Amino acid sequence: MDKYKRVPKEKVDQDSIKDNEIRVVATSQRSARNYISYSMNLLTAEGEKAQDTIILRAMGRAVNKTINICEIIKRRVPGLHQLTKLESTTLVDNFEPLVQGLDPKEITRTVSAISITLSKNELDTSDPGYQPPLPESQVQTEQAARAKRQAAQKEAQEAEEAAGGEGGEEGGRGRGGGRGKGAGRGRGGSKGKGKGK
């Protein structure tokens, strides 16, 4: 295939994507954290941008990332019903030759796809992909999670200060009191191969 190059596909028209639809891409520069915060903003917003339902869609390698994002959102927003649908999609890749005399190639491949609907409203409970909301004990709102992280950081900082973490004689990698240069490795005085005297 080194004598062929892939013909770029047309981009999906952004107008055809609904306001509550989020397309997760594996190679995207966006991290999972960005998808999570955007999804949570849609679900917890007030006014015109507020959404009761969001749809996470992904294909191929992004399926795993999408499931992780969904699980985190469910543990941050209380009362979310989930409906998961798996499907296979056939994609056609077109290749044009770089060398004259070769014919264009068309390769068909099957890719797995997932669509996860998260809703504050009850969904079709008879659907095999339905999952009820998590119990309140397993849901931790964003504010509670942030407070817990800050408390843990403060506790760690206090423990470090109590142990004398000012970089004194015994401690850490502060200024001075380090290991020094030491004898080094190799060069001078080695008994290995090389020029002898």
Image: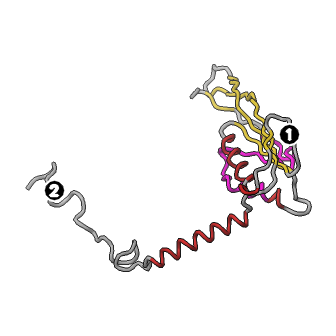
Q: Secondary structure at mark 1?
A: loop
8 or 178: nearer the eye? 178
184 or 154: nearer the eye? 154
Q: Of the numbered discs in the image, which one, if any, rests on residue 190?
A: 2
Question: Residue type at mark 1?
Answer: Thr
Question: For the point 68% across and 56% down, which residue is it?
Answer: 33
Q: CA distance from mark 2 to mark 1?
A: 76 Å
Question: For the point 71% across and 66% down, which residue is it?
Answer: 144
Residue 10 image offset from top left, x and y in percent = 78, 38
Question: Residue type at mark 2?
Answer: Ser
Dot placed on the residue nearer the N-terminal end, 2 or 1: 1
Q: Quadrant of residue 51?
A: bottom right
Q: Of the numbered discs in the image, which one, if any, rests on residue 97?
A: none
Q: Quadrant of residue 25?
A: top right
Residue 175 visible in this rendered orientation of the protein:
yes
167 or 24: nearer the eye? 167
Q: Residue furthest left?
A: 197
Residue 21 image offset from top left, x and y in percent = 82, 47
Residue 135 image offset from top left, x and y in percent = 76, 53
Q: Judge the density around disc 1: few (<14), some (14-19), many (≥20) Cα neighbours within 10 Å.
A: few
Quadrant including the N terminus: top right
Residue 67 image offset from top left, x and y in percent = 70, 44
Extent of the magenta region: 11-40
Residue marked by disc 1: 125
Q: Quadrant of residue 102?
A: top right
Q: Is residue 171 above or below residue 109?
A: below
